[in-house]
Image (spheres, grey):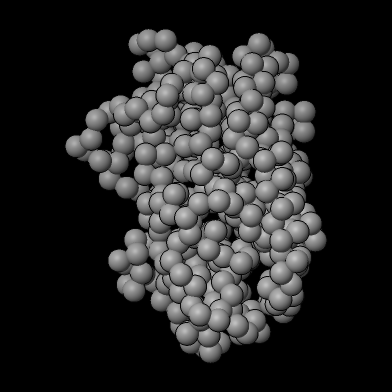
Amino acid sequence: MRIALVSAQANPLVLGGPGTRGRHTHVAALSGALGGLGHEVVVYVRREEPDVPAEAPFAPGVTVERVPAGPERPVPADDQLPLMGEFGRALAARWAAGDGPDVVHAHYWLSGLAALTATAEARRPVVVTYHGLAAVERRHLPVDRNAGPGPRAGLERQLGSLADRVVAQSEDEVADLGRMGVRRAGTVIVPSGVDVDRFTPGGPTADHRRPGLRRILSVGPLEERKGFTDLIEALRRVPGAELVIVGGPDPAEVDRDPGARRLLQAADRFGVADRLRIVGAVTQDELAGWYRSADVLACAPWYEPFGLTPLEAMACGVPVVAYATGGIAESVIDNVTGVLVPPRDTLAMAGALRGLLGDEVRRMSFASAAIDRVRSRYTWDRTATELERVYRAVSGGDDSAPAPDEADEDEEALSEVS
């Protein structure tokens, strides 16, 4: 099967660098797993550099193609909406000139709009994974940070009605999609996977702990909504432990990064500056070593539609203490693979961390259960196999696609934007 992964906002070729996110990991791993099943996979990304090849091999059976759309430089995802019409038309022209894909799987709402544009005339089945919804993000962000609803929520709703399938990553996301107006019959749950060959209990560990201190690890971009400030506040109530944060800018740029400076100021305010370390961005292989170096992984996002880092830690045999929000509340089993606490409750977070760090037997029990859970439910081979069934269903003319008159009406509204 010829599969197009449209990922204008997340290039798997830059995986592990500063600014990369879970979408980069998802697209990179999924494309490789699909290629491993014998499919012909092309990942379409937006061209951001003028002096690089238009195509690059990525994995067996997988090619990355850079599509010109807008300036050949990095553009923040929030500013890419005006570029998606051009991106989609470029895809349509490519596919018209040769053998097009049997199915198109878009990642993120902006890439979904490009996929709909690309398939508007020569219809091909479109599958979309949102990787986060506007309505949910607005619900969890502070009110004074919202500049207004903008067009995203409405376009996400149209995308959900036009796509042949919407892939959700948790029951929580299905509920949010339903509130948005996306039909449950057109939605399927396929969680992300974990690279269980890379993220393993055995292997080298990164760095050395400070003598006498337990290590709490947290991973992610240095954004306020990831809740690192909550963890810093909790740390003052967890004596004998250090907090190591991996993610954000290049390690050489940490001292000048605004997000890192904000966290260091918080550490000064809470009196734990001597027990906080911000590492910066690391490669995937290095990340596995950082997980293995930890006693516990702490996750405190205000909201997380899926949450890959808890599963990567679990695959390495590291128990998790996390806010019970979004997909994390489903992937982490409370008091089996970790501890879930109410969102934004730093006292509960501190208590859970103290309790787990002080109980070696409990940590070992959680670690064993965590490894088993990931290997039985969250491998990329399983994710790719489940998506393969979705692709075959929509390629066979599944009747859950929108009726022609509904699709035409929605496409007229979409064309006004793109």
| In the rendered image, the vertical position of residue 255 relative to residue 287, given as above or below | below
The location of residue 332, given as percent across then percent down, is 72, 54
Q: Is residue 375 visible?
A: yes
Q: Viewed as shown, does residue 393 lie left or right of 151?
A: right
Q: Viewed as shown, does residue 181 lie left or right of 24?
A: right
| In the rendered image, the vertical position of residue 165 relative to residue 228, given as above or below | above
The location of residue 1, given as percent across then percent down, is 53, 14
The location of residue 375, given as percent across then percent down, is 67, 41
Image quarter (top left, top right, bottom left or bottom right) of the C terminus: top left
Q: Give the residue drawn at x 38%, y 25%.
A: 63
Q: Give the residue drawn at x 64%, y 16%.
A: 392
Q: Give the residue drawn at x 62%, y 22%.
A: 388
Q: Is residue 87 visible?
A: no
Q: Viewed as shown, does residue 55 lie left or right of 221?
A: left
User: Which residue occupies the foreground of this view, 197 or 274?
Assistant: 197
The location of residue 288, given as percent across then percent down, is 50, 53
User: Which residue occupies the foreground of this view, 128 or 79?
Assistant: 128
Q: Viewed as shown, does residue 73 lie left or right of 32?
A: left
Q: Give the residue drawn at x 57%, y 24%.
A: 126
